[in-house]
Amino acid sequence: MVRKLNLNLASGDNIFSSQETRDAEKREAEQTEWLEDLPISLIDDHPDHPYGIRMDADMLGTIESVKEHGVLVRALVRPKADGRYEMLAGYRRRFASLETGRTMLPCIVSVKTDDEATIVMVDSNAQRSVILPSEKAKAYKIKLPAMDRQGERTDLTLSGIPTKLEKGARTADLVGKPFGDKKDTVYQYIALNDLISALLEMVDNKILGVKDKPKMGLYPAAELAELSEEAQGWVLDAITMNDCTPSHAQAIRMRDDFKAGKLTEDSILSIMQEEKPNQVEQFKLPREKLSRFFPEGTPAEKIEATIIKALELLERQQKRIREKNNRDRG
C-alpha cells in the first residue's frame, strides 16, 4: 500500500525567501504612509485646490529659505492610480523649489480617500498669514460637504479637533474652527462663490489693500451674492459711478428689494447715493472735466496730489501778490 505524504511545501516563489523578507513585503503592501523624495514633475495639483501663490514677502522668504537650507518640512501628497501623485500640502514649498532650480521634493506620501484629501488640503493652509476671502470661499465650499460625508470622523483634519463631534455641534462650526470662523461666517464665505468676479475682487482687495481699487467687506458682499448676475452688474455700475461700495445696511436693502421683485437699476443708484452713517463728505470732480489736464489712465491718487500741489502754488502766488500790493501802497 502506497502512503501519500502531505509535506505542505512552500510555493516556488517563497522557497528561497526568508520569513523576515516575507513579513517586510507584507508590511509594505499594507503601508498607508511613508517618506519619499519625489520628482516634482510627477506631482499634480489637487483639482479643487483653492489657494493661490502670491509673490509677497512670505513667499520671498520661503524661496530664500529653500535656496539656503532646502525644504525643511516635507510636503504631503497622495498616490494616484496612474502612478503619479496629487499635492495636498506644500504648494509654496514646491514653487520655491522650482524657483531655486530643484527637481526633487521631500514628501510624505499618504493614502487617502477623496474626502480625506480635501479636508487635509484645506486645513493645511489655515496658518497662512494672508488668506483671501475668495480662497476661503472656495475652501469652505468643498470642505463642508466632505466633512458631512465623513460623519463623526473629525480626526482627518489637521486642527486638533476631537475624534467625536461634541453633542449638538454643527459641521459648519468645525469647518471654520482651524481658521477661527464660526458657522455663520463660514456660510457667508461660501455665499461669495455666487458673486461676479469684479465684486469678488473688491472683497479680496479689503485684505490686499491695492490703492485706487474699491474695497468691500464680507457682510455686504454676502448679501449682494443673493442677487442675480444682472442685478450684481447694476451694483457694479453704481459703485463705479459713485466711487464707493455699499454699506451692509444698503446691501440688505438691495437684497430685500430683489427678493420682493422691486430692485431696479435706478433703485440701486438711489440707495447708493444716500449718505451713509458717519460718512465723510467728499468733493468730487467729474473725470471728463479733468481729461484735458491728465492722460487717460492716470491714478486718482496722482490726480489728487497734482491738484493739491497746484492749489498750494496758487496760494503762494496770491500771497506774494498781496504782499507786493501792500508794499506799493505803503
Image (cartoon, helix red, strand yellow):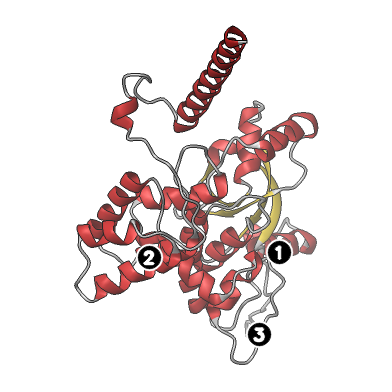
Q: Is residue 60 left or right of residue 169?
A: right
Q: In the picture, which quadrant includes the C terminus?
A: top right
Q: Is residue 280 left or right of residue 275?
A: right
Quarter assignment of residue 234: bottom left
* Residue at point 36%, 35% (across, down): 285
Q: Give coordinates of residue 238: x percent, y percent.
A: 30, 51
Upstream in the sequence, badge 2 or badge 1?
A: 1
* Residue 125 tag number: none
Q: In the picture, which quadrant includes the N terminus?
A: bottom right
Q: Give coordinates of residue 119: x percent, y percent.
A: 56, 66
* Residue 251 tag number: 2
Label 2: element kind: helix
* Residue 27 tag number: 1
Assess disc 1: are there few (<14), some (14-19) or many (≥20) residues with their C-alpha within 10 Å of its C-alpha: few
Quarter assignment of residue 43: top right
Q: Which residue is mark 3?
A: 164
Q: CB under 8 Å between callouts 2 and 3?
A: no
* Residue at point 34%, 57% (across, down): 272
Label 1: element kind: helix
Q: Give coordinates of residue 162: x percent, y percent.
A: 70, 80
- The answer to whether residue 55 is above or below residue 312 is below
